[in-house]
């Protein structure tokens, strides 16, 4: 195996939070059990450096997508077992996702394609979602609208799909909504992070090289995304996540204020500063800043 620098390339929690898996640039797949306490269950090696991974709702398998376009499955119930090749694309895979019932596996590649396959028989292709004009950077099956897929691309669009049929039902041009930046009129909006909150149907996105979080709301009946608000950051945004009850957490490249929390109030997202959980986590990150700084 190639010796890397141990940089983490992809990671995911299982739906219940009971398992955590990561892959690094030394081609290791490391599986942890998180409950009742954190314990490393296995360290396995993958064939290629990975780009994305996802854990099944049944919490029995990890699906790992790699740079050569392949997806391998690794058992959780048999944590030492070798991986099994499940499917392949001809180009680099950018993201992999599963439907809420584990019935479908969805893969997105650098050549604008989203493929929908049967998880138990991945050689059976159900549909292709075609329409993006550049690489597909992120895909997400909407948890409480399980027939809808949200995708993002280097073409500066967010799109909604009825993925089982491959039908595009909505296209959101980020450059139109977010507006051209004065100093970068040709700014691209390449989405690097998507997070979704079932409570309210909110979608938050983070784009490469843009210190802003954009918030949308899903109208499930009309199958549309409604633009709501943007949150400007003073520093580069690293990651975003919704808490189950709806608070939005933002991790940014700033040792003095590494974590921000926003809460919906009267239709607007407003900063929260007096939350004890926020203060505790911020201090932990500050105390371990060299890890985050790389």
Image: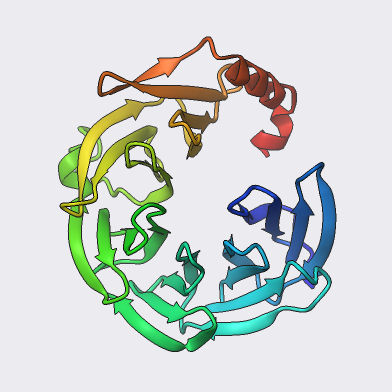
Residue 271 left/right relative to 31? left
Residue 154 appears in the rendering: yes
Which residue is rendered at x = 66% and y = 69% of the image? 61
Residue 234 appears in the rendering: no
Residue 259 left/right relative to 218? right
Image x and y of residue 11, in percent: 63, 54
124 vs 71: above or below: below
Quick one: 274 or 182, which is closer to the camera?
Answer: 274
Residue 145 left/right relative to 292? left
Pick the quarter of the image with the N terminus: bottom right
Which residue is rendered at x = 19% and y = 57% of the image? 171
Q: Residue furthest top?
A: 274
Which residue is rendered at x = 46% and y = 84% of the image? 90
Residue 183 location, quadrant: top left
281 vs 239: above or below: above
Image x and y of residue 53, in percent: 59, 63
Pick the quarter of the image with the C terminus: top right
Quick one: 175 or 60, which is closer to the camera?
Answer: 60
Image x and y of residue 269, in percent: 33, 23
Which residue is rendered at x = 57% and y = 24% of the image? 258
């Amino acid at each position: 195996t190639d010796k890397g620098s141990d940089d983490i390339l992809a990671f995911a929690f299982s739906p219940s939070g009971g398992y955590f898996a990561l892959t690094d640039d030394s081609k290791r797949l490391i599986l942890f059990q998180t409950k009742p306490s954190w314990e490393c269950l296995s360290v396995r090696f993958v064939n290629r450096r990975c780009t994305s991974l996802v854990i099944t709702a049944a919490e029995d398998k990890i699906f790992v997508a790699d740079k050569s376009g392949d997806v391998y499955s690794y058992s959780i119930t048999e944590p030492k077992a070798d991986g099994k090749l499940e499917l392949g694309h001809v180009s680099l895979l950018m993201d992999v996702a599963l439907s809420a019932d584990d019935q479908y596996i969805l893969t997105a590649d650098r050549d604008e394609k989203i493929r929908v396959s049967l998880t138990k028989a991945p050689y059976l292709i159900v549909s292709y979602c075609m329409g993006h004009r550049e690489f597909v950077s992120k895909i997400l099956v909407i948890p409480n609208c399980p027939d809808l897929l949200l995708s993002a691309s280097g073409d500066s669009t967010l799109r909604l799909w009825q993925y089982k049929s491959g039908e595009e039902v909505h296209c959101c041009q980020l450059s139109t909504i977010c507006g051209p930046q004065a100093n970068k009129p040709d700014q691209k909006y390449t989405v690097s992070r998507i997070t979704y909150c079932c409570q309210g149907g909110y979608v938050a996105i983070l784009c490469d090289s843009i210190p802003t979080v954009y918030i949308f709301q899903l109208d499930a009946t009309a199958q549309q995304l409604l633009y709501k608000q943007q949150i400007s950051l003073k520093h580069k945004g690293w990651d975003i996540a919704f808490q189950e009850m709806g608070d939005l957490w933002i991790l940014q490249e700033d040792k003095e204020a590494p974590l921000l929390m926003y809460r919906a109030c009267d239709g607007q997202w407003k900063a929260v500063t007096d939350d004890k959980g926020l203060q505790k986590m911020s201090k932990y990150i500050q105390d371990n800043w060299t890890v985050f700084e790389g």
